[in-house]
Image (tube, rainbow, N blue to C red):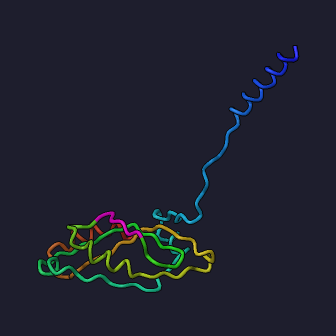
Amino acid sequence: MKLQQLLLIMSAMMTLTSCTSHNTQVLNSSEPLDLTHSKIAAQEYWVAAKLVSPKYPVANARHKIAGCSRFKLSINSNGETVDTELIESYPNNKFVAPSQGALKQWLWTPTDQNEARKAITRLVQLDFYMTDAKNYAQAKRHCAVGTQY
């Protein structure tokens, strides 16, 4: 009888143990906060301290082509721009290299709300316009979509 009771208790304990759920996911506090949904939300954490303008690509300038490049980038806890990822470049990819080169030099200052210097991910758009560009109107229309970044 005691053996049956012992087996019953052991079986019940094993069943209860297997039903227990353990949350093994650990949140990494160094992961950037994703604020790609809102320029306003991103500005509540970091404001630009140093912006470097990209050079207009020679081929696009020569052919009088206007456009823009959109990027997802991260701002680390030191206020440095890191991990630039191209989202889109219009109308060609000639704006990408000068944009990435400039973005990597951008520096940011934490706002008073971001005393902890929380890293974030946000969207940024760089525009390239010449008033006499052949595609000025089309570029303005296409790139206007990204002005919220």
Front residue of 19/138: it is 19
x and y, in percent, of residue 101 in the image: 32, 78
Front residue of 17/140: it is 17
Quarter of the picture containing the C terminus is: bottom left
State the image quarter where residue 60 is shown: bottom left
State the image quarter where residue 15 is shown: top right
Q: In this view, does 40 lie above or below 49?
A: above
x and y, in percent, of residue 112 in the image: 62, 80
How many numbered circles are shown? 0
**Residue at the (60%, 50%) spot, across then down:** 25
Q: Is residue 98 above or below residue 72?
A: below
In the image, taking residue 15 as reference, residue 121 lies left or right, namely left
**Residue at the (52%, 77%) spot, across then down:** 46
Please, which residue is most extreme toward the left here? 63
Front residue of 145/54: it is 54
Q: Tell me the chief SS of the magenta region.
A: strand
Please, which residue is most extreme toward the front here? 3
Please, which residue is most extreme toward the top here? 1
Quarter of the picture containing the N terminus is: top right
x and y, in percent, of residue 52 in the image: 36, 85
Q: Give the range drawn in magenta.
A: 83-88
Q: Does the magenta stretch include residue 146?
A: no
**Residue at the (14%, 77%) spot, across then down:** 59
x and y, in percent, of residue 77 in the image: 54, 75
**Residue at the (20%, 82%) spot, across then down:** 131
